Each structure stands twice: as structure tokens, then as C-alpha cells.
Image (cartoon, grey):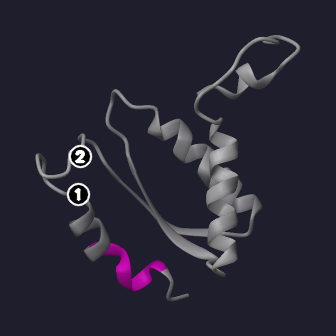
């Protein structure tokens, strides 16, 4: 996941099966801009054994550079397994939907 491994002078034979966070973030920003979305609420897991905090930081930076405002960031600290654990999104959406795109 680390973008440092994209440096071909240091890692000439490295091949990744997952694109770096910056590439994923730019793709998400491009889709949002294609639909003229300039404001979003951003949800992500901050569970202790995940790397989502680092990914969220990269997404936030790319959104800012792309002119997409994050009106709120909300997290949950457990793993979500659909059908097996409580769905954190119901409360997160209920808490944020009125302010997400109303500016």
C-alpha cells in the first residue's frame, strides 16, 4: 500500500496488485467531480488493526486539491461485516445527511 514502492529507481521489479492510495483517491475525486459533487461527508473505519486512517488522510488531501470540500468526517472503530455486525452507516447517515450537501 505504501507509495514509496512506486519509485522504480529503488524498486525496479516491484509489481503491485493494488494501486497506491493516491491513484485510488484521484479516481474517486474524478468520479465526484464528473457528477458535480463539490461537498461530501467522509466516513471511514478507524479500527485499530486497519490502515484506513492513512488512506483517509490521502483521500482528504486529494479532495482538497481537487476542490472537493469535506463537510464532516465520521468514523467507527469496529469491523463491519454485513449481516454479522451492527451497521454503523445508519447512525452516521442519520447524523449527517442534512448538512452534507446543504451549503
Q: Are marks 2 and 1 in contact (CB under 8 Å)?
A: yes
Residue 62 locus on image (x, y percent): 70, 54
Residue found 46% across the figure and 39% down from its top: 52
Looking at the image, residue 89 sits to the left or right of residue 53; the answer is left
Q: Residues within 10 Å of mark 1 (few under 14, many from 20)?
A: some
The image's mark for residue 37 is: none
Tell me the quarter of the image containing the N terminus.
top right
**Mark sitting earlier along the chain (2/1):** 2
Label 2, label 1: how far apart the Cα atoms are? 7 Å
Residue 8 figure quarter: top right
**Span highlighted in magenta in the image:** 95-100
In this figure, which residue is indicated by the disc labeled 1? 88
Residue 26 locus on image (x, y percent): 70, 54
Residue 29 locus on image (x, y percent): 66, 62
Reply yes or no: does residue 74 show up in magenta.
Answer: no
Residue found 13% across the figure and 52% down from its top: 83
Tell me the quarter of the image containing the C terminus.
bottom right
Q: In the picture shown, does residue 78 fall above or below 73?
A: above
Instruction: In this rendered view, identify the residue nearer to me: 72 or 28.
Output: 28
Q: Residues within 10 Å of mark 2 (few under 14, many from 20)?
A: some
Residue 23 figure quarter: top right
Instruction: In this rendered view, identify the residue nearer to me: 83 or 61.
Output: 83
In this figure, which residue is indicated by the disc labeled 2? 80
Residue found 64% across the figure and 51% down from its top: 25
Chief SS of the magenta region: helix
Residue 82 locus on image (x, y percent): 19, 51
Q: In the picture shown, does residue 54 fall above or below 96?
A: above
Amino acid at each position: 500500500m505504501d507509495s514509496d514502492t512506486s519509485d522504480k529507481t529503488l524498486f525496479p521489479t516491484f509489481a503491485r496488485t493494488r494501486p497506491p492510495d493516491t491513484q485510488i483517491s484521484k479516481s474517486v475525486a474524478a468520479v465526484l467531480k464528473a457528477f458535480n459533487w463539490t461537498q461530501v461527508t467522509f466516513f471511514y473505519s478507524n479500527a485499530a488493526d486497519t490502515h484506513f486512517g492513512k488512506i483517509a488522510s490521502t483521500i482528504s488531501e486529494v479532495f482538497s486539491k481537487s476542490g472537493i470540500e469535506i463537510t464532516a468526517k465520521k468514523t467507527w472503530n469496529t469491523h463491519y461485516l454485513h449481516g454479522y455486525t451492527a451497521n454503523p452507516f445508519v447512525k452516521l447517515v442519520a447524523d449527517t445527511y442534512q448538512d452534507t450537501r446543504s451549503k
